[in-house]
Image: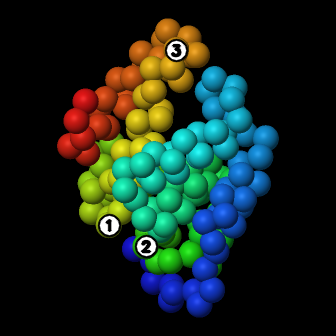
Amino acid sequence: MTDRPESPARLSLADVEALARAAHAGQTDKAGRPYAEHLAAVAEGVRRRGGDDEQIAAAWLHDAVEDAALTRAWLLDAPLSRRTRDIVLAVTKRPGEPPEAYAERVLATDGAPLVKEADLAHNADPARLALLDEATRTRLAEKYTRMRALLGLPE
């Protein structure tokens, strides 16, 4: 996806985590929890599912561009592997993009399906959804179920 050359010195996972936490500082999720909790849960979910360091780095950054915590230009120039950058771009939703096109891009990008699986697992966690009002909980549960189906993930 990216045409940039590999950076000679890459950020460590600890550096990526610190960067992601700083970029999302002050942001909260739909339940009002610090957004970094979601990033940590997704990174841990990727690790538990056998993901490698490039996927774990992408998990920490998976919402950074979409949430405007970091710019796409920053990502393209960041001292990250090409694969990590590609995964982040693959899981970054684009305005007006149909879910089918989004799922197709995720499936076509090496390493991205595992990151998205961990993201969906945390987003759809019943304990996390229980903190939301009923209408939001229902809407999000349906959205996550549909995306899991588009990605061919088990219920």
Q: Quadrant of residue 151?
A: top left
Q: Is residue 95 visible?
A: no
Amino acid type of the residue tagged 3 in the rendering: Ala
Residue 5, how many percent across, how many down? 50, 89
Task: From this view, report whether residue 105 is shown above or below residue 28.
Answer: below
Identify which residue is drawn at 29% across, 32% down: 146
Check the image and report above or below for 126 versus 27: above
Which mark is drawn over residue 83?
2
Q: Are marks 2 and 1 in contact (CB under 8 Å)?
A: yes
User: Is residue 19 found left or right of 67 in the rendered image?
Assistant: right
Amino acid bearing label 2: Arg
Which of the two discs, 3 and 1, labels the residue nearer the N terminus? Answer: 1
User: In the figure, is residue 147 to the left or right of 86?
Assistant: left
Q: CA distance from mark 2 to mark 3?
A: 35 Å
- Quadrant containing the C terminus in the rendered view: top left
Point out residue 35 in the picture as x, y percentages from the top left corner: 66, 39
Q: Secondary structure at mark 1?
A: loop
Q: Which residue is mark 1?
A: 110
